[in-house]
Amino acid sequence: MSRRLWGLFSGIFCAMAVTGCGVAEEPVIEDTEIQKVELVVWGAEEDKELMEQIIQSFQANYQGQADFEISFEAQGESQCKDVLLGGLEEGADVFTFADDQLNALAAAGALDPIENADEIRSRNLSSTVEAATVNDQLYAYPLTADNGYFLYYNKRYITEEQAKTLDGILEAAAAKEKLFTMDWTSAWYVYSFFGNTGLEVGLNDDGITNYCTWNQMDGDIRGLDVAQAMLRIADNPGFANCTDEEFMNGVKDGSVIAGVSGVWNSVAVKEAWGENAGAAKLPTYTCDNRQVQMASFSGCKLIGVNAYSEYPEWASRLAEWITNEENQRLRFEMRGQGPSNIVVANSEQISQSPAIAALLEQSEFSQLQRVGGKFWDPVSKFAGNIAAGNPSRQSLQEQLDEMTEEVSAR
């Protein structure tokens, strides 16, 4: 081919490249305008400094991907459901709430199932995943695993071996004219004696009423066996039925050397007992001539994403950011709250916190608090009478029957 023909063909090819066979000659300029994203986060007043720090790190991490305007508003976790359901479209995009509100929020359509559920499940303790799940669907992001109770004990008076059994604790307390305390006016704590016996309590399918077998007269352990065990404990000179406030007063004045409470008292107990401050899972207690591990109600905090959020993808990213490993570690450092994240929960940092470590150890013997409103008063009434030594002398079986009937009332 001659140079002239080659030049002609080259010109034709160049022209085709420029015109693109009919495509506009001017290059297309993509719209690079950054989306404005406005999000509101609800959380406890005490979390304000922590949450603002987390929000800042989130904005820095996603800098340039959106024009963020994220604000934090104080909203108590225990009232979150009621406030949110009062106006979902006006509610926060991301919010912290107690796990016992999950069913109601999911039923009301306030929460959508989480898309990357398997990934979130793999990062968190199974108990917190269960707390965030309804009908096998994950509806919220686990945040903490510290709403429960365990044993505090003063190592000056009680050895680690004695702390394993309630018999050992009571013997040590009585010998030194000191006290082990537990709040039997609260059904929350009374569950400890029934929880690992095969006797059951929980919600019916209506989500409102309860079923209860605590008065069961057959089976491996009967309700009467538990009641008799509790009466023996109440008669021990080393035991006292005390509220949480009374427990702490006794810790400070030296009259109490052991008791059942939660992480909220860890700093005060440490200040009072110093290096002698010990913490462990709940002990076993003698029931029907055997040792039964004391159970506990457990709970956790969750992060939810409002199904009516204008920016659901960004709200979900923020919720996941708040609950990631780094920020759960930060939450423990700043607020002393127990992590749901598996890596943080198993870290050396957590093992050096006796209270959190004890709570996580107790989690193996805990059950999510899923009971209706009629559970509380009858159980407190029953346990209060037992704690006083059964002054009415009413049959224990009759008391169990009355309590169970009232707990299960429709």
Image: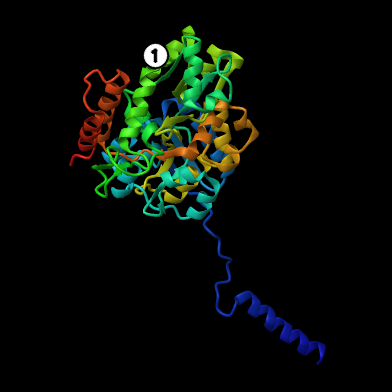
The correct choice, above or below, for 28 with respect to 104 in the image is: below
Across and down, in percent, residue 146 comes to 47, 33
The residue identified by callout 1 is 246
Q: Is residue 309 left or right of residue 327?
A: left
The quarter of the picture where the N terminus appears is bottom right
Across and down, in percent, residue 81 comes to 32, 38
Across and down, in percent, residue 82 comes to 28, 36
Hey, what amino acid is under mark 1? Glu
400 or 78: nearer the eye? 400
Q: Is residue 249 left or right of residue 210?
A: right
138 or 190: nearer the eye? 190
Asked if one can make out residue 214 in the rendered structure from this viewpoint, the answer is: yes
4 or 126: nearer the eye? 126
Q: Residues within 10 Å of mark 1 (few under 14, many from 20)?
A: some
User: Which corner quadrant of the image does residue 16 belong to?
Assistant: bottom right
Q: In terms of secondary structure, where does tag 1 sit?
A: helix
Across and down, in percent, residue 281 comes to 51, 31
Instruction: Identify the residue at image location x=53%, y=28%.
Output: 164
For this orientation, the residue located farthest to the left is 410
Instruction: Identify the residue at image location x=49%, y=8%.
Output: 254
Instruction: Identify the residue at image location x=53%, y=24%.
Output: 163
For this orientation, the residue located farthest to the right is 2
Q: Is residue 89 left or right of residue 55?
A: left
For this orientation, the residue located farthest to the front is 289
Instruction: Identify the residue at image location x=35%, y=32%.
Output: 226
User: Which corner quadrant of the image does residue 347 belong to?
Assistant: top right
